[in-house]
Amino acid sequence: MSILKVARIGNPILRRRAGEVPRAAIGSPELERLIEDMTETMVEYDGVGLAAPQVHEPLRLAVLQVPADDEQEEIPLMVLINPVVTPLPSEKVSGWEGCLSVPDLRGMVTRPDRVRLQALDREGKPIELEASGFHARVIQHECDHLDGVIYIDRMDDLSTLSFLPEFERYVVTDGDVECV
Ligand code: NI
């Protein structure tokens, strides 16, 4: 396995719509290797999600995982191939997000609290689930990457944008906030 280089904003690959993963590629050694490398890269950089365009692969593929020891709900490793996210009727909620492609920054983003996710897993089996709360936020953040959308595009108040040390000093002074 390898730790992959993460593209940062300004790199055009982050702004393109990624292409569908061909059905025939699912389960191939090349795609499995990419999934393993993306997972290792996400863990190495303390991310809770990573989309393929962030590692210079223009494919509709994302991984996400929130470790058990975090204050947020645990999300076991999920591999999403060609995901489709549909907001469900719910209130919109604000939460802090960060992104490995926008290093050392945090910003407040308002998103639907509940979504339906349809995707294929790494074996090509259908995934269909409803998610809420932080899980829904991570899914939306990662799937946005597949359409060339970055969380800062979704911020309705840029004044919350903070560098990480200032975020920890002035915004979150009472503990940890898990960011996407
Ligand atoms: Ni991101």
Image: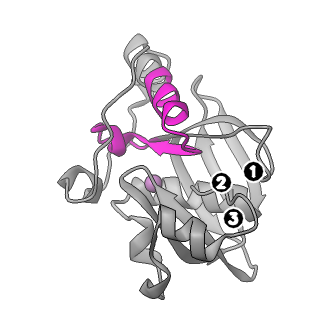
Please state the extent of the stretch shown in magenta in the rendering: 36-61
Quadrant in the rendering for residue 116: bottom right
Residue 90 lies, in percent from the top left, at: 76, 79
Tell whether 98 sits left or right of 22.
right
Mark nearer the N terminus (1 vs 3): 3
> Up-down: is 117 above or below 169?
above
Name the amino acid, label 2: Leu
Q: Tag 1: Cα neighbours inside 10 Å, few (<14), some, or many (≥20)?
A: few
Q: Nearer the viewer, residue 8 or 52?
A: 8
**Assess mark 1: CB under 8 A from ligand 1?**
no
Asked if the residues shown at circle 1 and circle 2 are in contact, with their CB atoms under 8 angstroms apart, the answer is yes
Q: Residue at x 50, y 31 (%)?
A: 44
* Dot 3 beta carbon under 8 Å from ligand 1: no
Q: Write down the residue under mark 2.
A: 117
Q: CA distance from mark 1 to mark 2?
A: 5 Å
Residue 165 lies in the magenta-colored region: no
- Where does residue 1 sit, x and y in percent of width and height? 44, 13
- Say whether marks 3 and 2 touch (CB < 8 Å): yes
Kindly state the secondary structure of the residue where label 2 is placed: strand
Instruction: Pick the quarter of the image with the C terminus.
Output: bottom right
Mark 3 residue element: strand
Q: Which residue is mark 1?
A: 129
The quadrant holding residue 96 is: bottom right
Q: Mark 1 falls on what kind of element?
A: strand
Q: Nearer the viewer, residue 153 or 81?
A: 153
**Residue position marked by numbered label 3 in the rendering:** 115
Residue 80 locus on image (x, y percent): 56, 40
Q: Residues within 10 Å of mark 3 (few under 14, many from 20)?
A: many
Mark 1 or 2, nearer chain start: 2
